[in-house]
Image (cartoon, coloured by chain):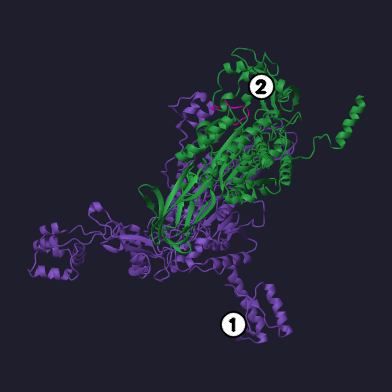
Chain colours: A green, B purple
Amino acid sequence: MKRVALLCVVILILSGIIPSETAKVTVPLRFDQYYPLEMVYEALQALHEAYPEQTNLEIVGNSEEGRPIYAMTVNIAKTGKALDKPGVYVDGNIHGNEIQGGEICLYLLDYLLGNYGKNEEVTQLMDKNCFYVVPVVNPDGRYHFFVDANTSSSNRSLRIPTDDDHDGLVDEDFPDDLDGDGNICRMRKKDPFGEFKTDPEDPRLMVRVKPGEKGEWTMLGQEGIDNDGDGRVNEDSEGYVDPNRNWGYDWAPPYVQSGAGEYPFSAVGLKAMGTWILTKTNICIGWSFHNYGGMFLRGPSRKGVGEYPRGDIAVYDYIGQQAERITPGYRYMISWKDLYTTYGDSVEWLVQLGGVYGYVGEVFMSESETFVTLEEEQKRDPISEGPMATMGRETRNRERLDYSDHLAMGELYKPWEPFKHPTYGDIEIGGWVKMSGRLSAPFMIKDMVHRNAMSVIFSAKHTPEVSLDVFDVQKVDKNFFRVRTRLSNARAIPTMTYQAQKVNLYPKDILKVSGSNSKVLAGGVLTDPYNDRVNYKKHRPETQFLVVPGFGKVEHQFLVEGKGNLTVLYESRHGGKLEKTIQLK
Amino acid sequence: MFAYLIIALPKTSEFGKMDFRFQTIGFTVRFSSGYLMGIEVKMKNFRWFGWVFGLMTLSWSLAAEVKFEKYHNPEELKTVIQEIARTNPGIVKIHNLVKSAGGTDLDLLEIGPEVAKKEKTVPAVFVAANMEGIVPLASEAALFLVKQLIEKAETRESLSWYILPCGNPDAAARYFARPLIEDPRNASPFNDDKDDAADEDGTEDLDGNGLITQMRVKDPEGMWTSIPGNPRLMKKADWSKGEKGQYKLYPEGLDNDGDGEINEDGPGGVNIGIQFPHLFKFFTADGGLWAGSEKESFALIKFVSEHREIGLTFVFGRANFCLAPPRGGRKGEADLNEIKIPKRHTGFLNADPDKTYTMAEIIEMVKPIVPEGMEVDESMIASFLGLGALVNPLPEDLKFYKQLSEEYKEFLKEKKFDAKRLDPPPDKDGSFELWSYYHLGLPSFAMDFWTLPEIEKEKKEQEITPEKLEEMSDEDFIALGEEKIDAFLKSVGAPAQFKAKQVIESLKGGMMDTKRMAEMLKKMPKPPSEEGADSKEEALLAFSDKELGGKGFVEWKPFKHPTLGDVEIGGPVPFTDSTPPPEKIEFLLNNQVPWIFEITKKMARIHIAKTEAKRLGSDVYEIKAWIENTGYLPYPTAMGQHNKSILPVIVTLTGQGLNIVDGQKRSLIPAIDGYSAQPVTWIVRVDNPAKIEIKASTQTAWSDTKSIDLGGV
């Protein structure tokens, strides 16, 4: 019976009914696994084939090793052209090892496209906005992270050969996967003078010895060999050029900002991204997903850049505080203050030079890997702030190992195993594996991608929704009229950021009043309709420049001589195009 | 220009044969109708004539028939460069970096012994000229340098040169266009006034004189007034001194877009000269979006970064680091000896927020906290604490800049080329010369070649004042002499007829005495004051009057402006304060450009001074090598050392059957000062007699190899 069953399974696999490891990606996408680079490409293709009318798939540029960077634009053509609608930008995986951004982007696309026409809110959202999604900004990084042996933090960089250890040789000392298990773990050696001893609670772990206590183990460091014979191990691997430090705004050289690269946009893929993004003049909100820590960060990325205007902070707070509720545990914070100073990062560039409201999402909290009852959890100390604080806590390691044992069947940790090292002799290799620490176990992916996509969707709900109203027309004299217009925004995001207004980054919204048989003699912002107080514009009154605030309005008054039709035209990068025609008679 | 010979009339087969022969010499000459230069030549004389003519043109091309009696426009520049490359194929190569925003090629000349090589083995000097596009003299200087390099083979024997004669061709073209306007922006469209159109309101030559100058309009809100003592010039009225403003000033032009502003959105663009990453200023009128956001600057940054053999840079423009060191005194410097640790980090670092620490101390504090294997160095601490970039030259580097500027002044003095001129303007933030020093860590020099001559302020004759005159006797006064008396009369504003001669006569004749004169003079109104005049503008006027026949300044003339009404158009002529008359070019360049060769002679040069092998045991030796820098300049600069942009000297020891017992196969020497040496030692063991080789190599300071025979008898 067993043999027959086995045969059946084999036949079924061969006939493709039971999907095997290399099955084709289908829509709707699945989110119980991480997507290696090729699968991301396949998923994008599958989405585009399933929704050819609503999606546009293009290659923005290529990486250093020639891999394409794909962008998918989602726009419902029947409600307008892409550039005429507010734009929502989402990217992921700028750091090669921070792969979850890829899954979040794919989930967002899959969810939106799959629910268009079925869920009313989603339908309205997609009719209003245009979405630009770049799941993998660093394809070389993603590729090598999956395919090569890595720690959870390695392969972050771009593949730009750099002499990290300043010895005249370039990228000559990569980590080595000595035991061939696909992970770069740690090495230890038995040593009575060592600083560590086996943890009495779990032999797989170690604890520090107390002063005077006999030692057992010395930690040798990261798995590897001194490839270039300079006495250091693994000190010059790929790059190191941090793709999130190479952007053109507030860039600083490597001695100030480690990993900045030689000059702004020296990375070919990033330069292509920068050029491409600036052509999408309608982008008003942007999200960039990284790992880890559980945060939604707003800028500025460095104190010296200067705090954002109050009007912008209000918008950031409005969305950020909601996001904290969509993903409880994640904290909405300020980049330079609550995390650390950075120069030349992508989101600050978006904010300052793109005029966008930009967020960094740092997903996944290792604190979620618990092994306690609800009561035990509520009783213990709150987890302190900052990424440095969770390092090296022995009780935490035990709990994580319990989690790994019972919820991931031991997959997150490699027990110590002996190995013969060419330099150190008899050692042992073991520790936390690549797909741990910064990445959740696969069963938690769906929750993570859905919640983060919902934060993006919440912000997309609040892109500007502008209405144009000619709310008062008064005949002052035979051929002379007073016309009042109102532009109102029902949502939180204004039609231009206050920061962009402050530096005059690009032209404001335009309100143009014209008629075939009339002339605008005066026009300006109506500050007090009851007392007829107007800030009249000195020149060219028929063309007004303005910004419509979030949850607010702006009113204008025009004095028009003539009669007949009068057209009021509104054009805005982020607020779309509106037109109203009235008759003056 | 070069002549081309195309034998146009193959009337007989004889001509055909001639044609071929001329072509093998490598040049051709264009003519028509069988006439050579309008002279009918008999067939039998032709061959002789042809050879002589041919040799003449050949020698012209070798000497690069470039003359320095005018400014080359972009087309002429391109032609000259191409011809130079064509006639010197083994030593000159053109790199076409990129096309400017306006479509002009940015051509970079490579001159040296390795033009055909991809892997460079000798260092290079990089010269960037006219980066702002408004200094035509700088482009001429670059051409002059190219000519010198070709003529003097010793300057390019073991040194390559990269020369960019014009870094901002779009802007440079404006010097040759009319109306003449001085504007450093390239041709990228840019909506300066952020209205609904780009580049819609530029300048207009309203008075049709081919120059864009200024307009002044009488306006009750006007803040400017003309200077009484020098009425062509204007100054801002100082109400506290009782001065009233009369005029508003505008650049010459119309309000094309009817927005109330004049010429606020001209064509272009970005000033390439301030597009470089060090101290790049964001959100300026003409700096561009970010450092390298324009094609011209990005291509240049990329090229320089890819050519690590560049060990020295020069910029020809308006700033000058040769006469005086690059300036310091900028705020925002990271002082590495007194670092305050921000409160949010003092907790886990166990540091005192009120104390300052040195970099070394902080490194020691951080080491035990970071995960193993993570390198803790200055750069990591600097970025973690947000310390920022260095913005002032390091003291060690200022030493050589100072010394070299003294030597340069001597150099010029010996040539009697030290007439007083206005100080060159200071270097600009975001310029190439600053980027080269602060980011690339290279000895970076900037050179300008001309500024307006300083005017000699006539010293007021302090000897005589109306007060002193009272005390003087008639005889003493006469004894001063006519010259001094004339000067005195002028300084007190005496009417023109009042000459010294008459005064002396009247004193002698008793019709006047000093006391009465003094009283009269005291009562006279003071001469119009020249106070408030800008010294640069005064110098411009003086130069224009004296040497340009007044052509450097347009006299204020009335004009009826369509929107402003009655205006006056006039003002300094563009380029007058930066670009001398063409007759001066050769003289200026001849005296100043050669200083560059003095500096290249001082480049750091790595050399193995001495090697020593001491036998310690049967086949064990102690090897010692002294690696020296035979050049004056340090390797690398202090800045290059601090920002780790220059590699150390790499010393390698190789040999057959060589075992290194103590020491490194590859040793790194981070820095060697000028005229200094550092030893490297090894203890080695050889099985058999062997020849070992010690190599000290750098990319920007040459390399050296020495071998030692070990073992044997």
Residue shown at 22% from the left, 54% from the top: B242
Image side of residue A176 versus residue A241, left or right: right
Is-magenta flag for residue A361? no
In-front residue for pair B516/A258: A258
Residue type beneath disc 2: Arg
In-front residue for pair B292/A345: A345
Give the letter of the chain under mark 1.
Answer: B
Q: How many marks?
A: 2
Residue type beneath disc 1: Met
Image side of residue B536 versus residue A397, left or right: left
Residue shown at 17% from the left, 63% from the top: B480
Residue on which the image places disc 1: B37
Q: Secondary structure at mark 2?
A: helix
Residue shown at 55% from the left, 63% from the top: B147
Q: List x then y, in percent, for residue B34.
A: 65, 85
| Whether residue B424 can be seen here | no
Magenta portion: prevailing SS class: loop
Residue on which the image places disc 2: A400
Q: List x then y, in percent, for residue B44.
A: 67, 86
Q: List x then y, in percent, for residue B315.
A: 50, 54
User: Dot 2: within a 10 Å radius of its alpha carbon, few (fewer than 14), some, or many (20 or more) residues?
Assistant: many
Residue shown at 60% from the left, 65% from the top: B82
From the viewer's perspective, is the residue at label 1 or at label 2 nearer?
2
| Whether residue B169 can be seen here | yes
Q: Secondary structure at mark 1?
A: loop
Mark 1–mark 2 Cα distance, whole angstroms, equals 95 Å
- Mark 1 on the same chain as mark 2: no
In magenta, the rendered stretch is B366-380
Q: Is residue A265 above or below residue A360?
A: below
User: In which quadrant of the rendered view does residue A349 lie?
Assistant: top right
Location of the N terminus of chain A by quadrant is top right
